[in-house]
Amino acid sequence: MKKNTGILTLLLTLIVTAGLIYGAAVGFGASRTGAAENIKLGLDLAGGVSITYQTVIDNPTKEQMDDTIYKLQRRVEGYSTEALVYQEGDNRINIEIPGVSDANTILEELGRPGSLEFQDISGNVLIEGTDIKGAEAKAYSDNLGNNSYQVALTLTDEGAEKFAEATRENLGRQIPIVYDGEVISAPTVQSEITDGNPSITNMESYEAAERLASTIRIGSLQLELQELRSKVVGAQLGEKAISSSLKAGAVGFVLVILFMLVIYLLPGLASGIALTIYVALMLVMLNAFEMTLTLPGIAGIILSIGMAVDANVIIFARIREELATGKTVRSAMKIGFKKALSAIVDGNITTLIAAVVLGLRGSGSVKGFAQTLALGIVLSMFTALVVTRLVLNALYALGLKNEKIYGVQKERRTIDFLGKKNICFLVSAAVILAGIAVMGVQAGRGAGALNYSLEFQGGTSTTIPFTEAMTIEEIDANVKPVVSEVIGSNEIQAQKVQGSNDVVIKTKELSLETRQALNATLAEQFGVDETAITAESISSSISNEVRADAVIAVIMASVLMLLYIWFRFKDLRFAASAVTALVHDVLVVLAFYAAARISVGNTFIACMLTIVGYSINATIVIFDRIRENMAAAGKKDELKEIVNRSITQTLTRSIYTSLTTFIMVAALFVLGVASIREFALPLMVGIVCGAYSSVCITGALWYVMKTKIQKKG
């Protein structure tokens, strides 16, 4: 690359970087397209209500589901234009209404979609909810100019015929409208109605007319639904989560850039520019693809920043190695990128497998995490392999050719990792067995092997933001009795949220009325802000499915990774040792969950699969080096020496990548909200464990399999 070309490339790169930053910060045009503030926020960030219904009948038709979803969508759009209704599986419907201020009231008004009937005074059914096409509140002026309100109904053709007969036979009588066994209105028939457009007149207010119309619309669904899960989130929590997560991301990002500059000098500057483009691209893409950003999604972005450094570290380590052999800077860069390619592609694809499995098996916010993680993996490969290369070549063309500013790999003494393999195996076995023992002891005491959240055991969880911190003893003595009296049960679990005054109370599944009564009582007794109390209810059927999904997700990801590694390395022993190490990492982190009593819920699945994907990324880098060294080895080279040399050569990469990712997650743990901390803490343990297993366990396992099992897979 000539000097003028280098100047132009660098200038264009800086212009693109500035444009992307501007687009993410401000946006383009009057609608501010691309601005980060226009990214759709999930319920955990915007606040609101979500609810999952299941049809009472087992096998509804597609037409019935489509009609029900359409009518529910029309119903909830009155609360928020961002409201969303969508099908899950064959017989479930999810409703999400973000950004609403009084979620409990909406949940009460939405109610449980059930049966709607128009009856005569003897209780005989005249028409059903399925005979009604629509119901709309209207205001009009009578002959004297007074405002009046009514509910205008539209009936189906069959419903119109039924209603004509019903009004003819019940002139002057009331026709009670019954919703789920309760009379919600009893209008009097004033004349025979044959056109299929009856009206319920003389409503006391427009609001009363709208409530009745809403209930009729929801009761006119073709399918009767039962509530499986509901969640109410205060907007204040979302604002705090966004603010703290942004601070965590900014702090972590700056620390990572400084680290790369100090360690890798000029290449570190190139990676800093590439990482900046990566972050800006991520924000613009979230907006462009209209992806919904959740709290775990923010964690996914911040985590992927740390993981994006990995490709740069691999490349820069390769460049330094080539410089150490006497290559010129230009030649070292060309060879370094070429040799790093396979490890980068294989490592990112295996992590992408974990993200895809999360997207398929996860639900709600976990899907948001999977989407941002997958997008981050793709963008990180682009910025590392394309942007970093362009910037490095441009800087070289500007005359920055001294190998000292690129760094030269110092000669390293090969470390005998395999000589310590038995000790490492014993330490790992001891940690895993200790975790199993802890789970057994806790299960024997009746506390549960793990601290299962609602997703795994069902019930209602209420998060109470007390104004002052409470000890567990104070909670047991003062809070639990109040809760027990309201809900009529002594089966209550209380948990303090580390780093805040919040207390999580887990109980049996509570009705909406009981939840509202509990909120009011807590506000009265302890002076907490009733609007800041959040709640989540999940039925036991949902929790059973989540437990099954967690196991299936880990198994599915492990099998797919095994197949991919087998395909790429043409040796089943590479795949078998990698997956065995993954199981090791999962069991160690599970032991940590048990010992620390961290809540095991939806984010547990995300955490485990992230660790699986991250750990195998490091393993593949080592395997790639073993494969390369074996191909170049002479007849006298011993296999043990090749493995030890390969692990030693990649040790710096393993440490640096783990450190940069750890920095990003640690920033989340220190500055994030409570729910993010519960995700970040085990992830930090997983990062350390993954680095350990990749360096000390995986290569050793492959060596044992290679020497003990001579037949190739």
Image: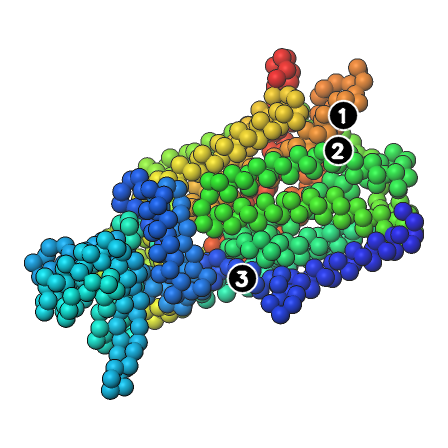
- Say few, some or many: other residues with alpha carbon within 10 Å of mark 1 (under 14 / 14 to 19 / 20 or more): some
First reached walking from the N terminus: tag 3 or tag 2: 3
- Say few, some or many: other residues with alpha carbon within 10 Å of mark 2 (under 14 / 14 to 19 / 20 or more): many
Q: Give the residue type at disc 1.
A: Asn
Rendered view: 504 above or below 641: below
Residue 532, percent across and down?
39, 66
In which quadrant of the rendered view does residue 552 lie? top left
Which residue lies at the image location 50% right of the left edge and 65% below the top edge?
239
Check residue 527 in the rendering and tell me which mark sits there, or answer none.
Answer: none
Reading the image, the residue beneath label 2 is 649
Asked if one can make out residue 52 in the rendered structure from this viewpoint, the answer is no
Q: Residue furthest front?
A: 194
Reading the image, the residue beneath label 1 is 629
Residue nearer the viewer, 130 or 429: 130
Gap in Å between the C-alphas at discs 1 and 2? 10 Å
Residue nearer the viewer, 695 or 617: 617
First reached walking from the N terminus: tag 1 or tag 3: 3
Residue nearer the viewer, 260 or 544: 544
Question: Mark 2 falls on what kind of element?
Answer: helix
Q: Are marks 3 and 2 in contact (CB under 8 Å)?
A: no
Which residue lies at the image location 64% right of the left edge and 15% below the top edge?
712
Coloring scheme used: rainbow
Residue 84, percent across and down?
43, 56
Reading the image, the residue beneath label 3 is 242
